[in-house]
Amino acid sequence: MKIVVKPCECEEIIKKSRFIGTISPCQSEAEALAQLKNLHAQHPNASHIVYAYRIKTPDGLVCRFYDAGEPSGTAGKPIFQHLEGKQLINLCVAVIRYFGGVKLGAGGLTRAYGNIAKQVIESAEIVDHVERVVLQLNLPYSQLQMLEYQLKKLDGEIIQQDFAAEIRLRVQLPKHQLEAFRLIFQ
């Protein structure tokens, strides 16, 4: 699976209609919906704001697409198919349309929305998704330097530390490194 690093946008005029494609990373369905609400605020005069998103949750993938008043299956689904085909997760792709007065027909709409989605995906920076885990540890001060060294080797990091009689830590590392980490620190 792959993720998008940062938001990206592209635009195209098709038969006098203006199409603006946006892609944004998001970690939850609530974040995706907030981004869509923001797009509606930025484009109050848009004819349609069509979208699709795929979010990985502990319960599995949450996948949604919406045609926004366009004929059923001609807008959200073509966008979603690109997300699925590229195995993209934790992102939202939206296409904003300002109607230019020329009807495109069902095939034309499907091609237009699909092509804009494809363009914005191709222009985005995409990387492999690495699932990460967070662990809580209590360590004596004498082991902190060794922990930092091992975390660096395993592509992990300290995300929180509290100094008391012992050091209470929260560390994050790739899930596939968890067993190697446990062999060292358990």
Image (tube, helix red, strand yellow):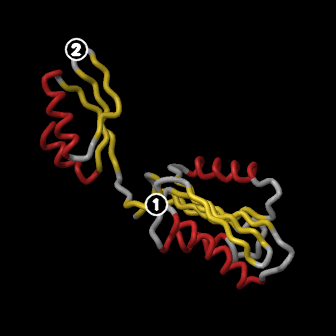
Task: Report how far apart the C-alphas of labels 2 and 1 lie in the structure.
Answer: 44 Å
- Residue annotated with mark 2: 165
Name the residue located 68 percent from the left edge and 64 percent from the top edge: 20
Q: Quadrant of residue 139?
A: top left
Name the residue located 17 percent from the left edge and 22 percent from the top edge: 140
Q: Amino acid at mark 1?
A: Glu
Along the line of sight, the residue nearer the viewer: 161 or 22: 22
- Label 1 CA crowd tier, 10 Å (few <14, some 14–19, many 20+): few
Residue 93 locus on image (x, y percent)? 60, 62
* Quarter that holds the C terminus: top left
* Residue 98 higher or lower than 111, as above or below: above
Q: Does dot 1 land on a helix, a strand or a loop?
A: loop
Q: Earlier in the sequence, mark 2 or mark 1?
A: 1
Name the residue located 76 percent from the left edge and 54 percent from the top edge: 43
Q: Amino acid at mark 2?
A: Ala
- Residue annotated with mark 1: 125
Q: Residue furthest top?
A: 165
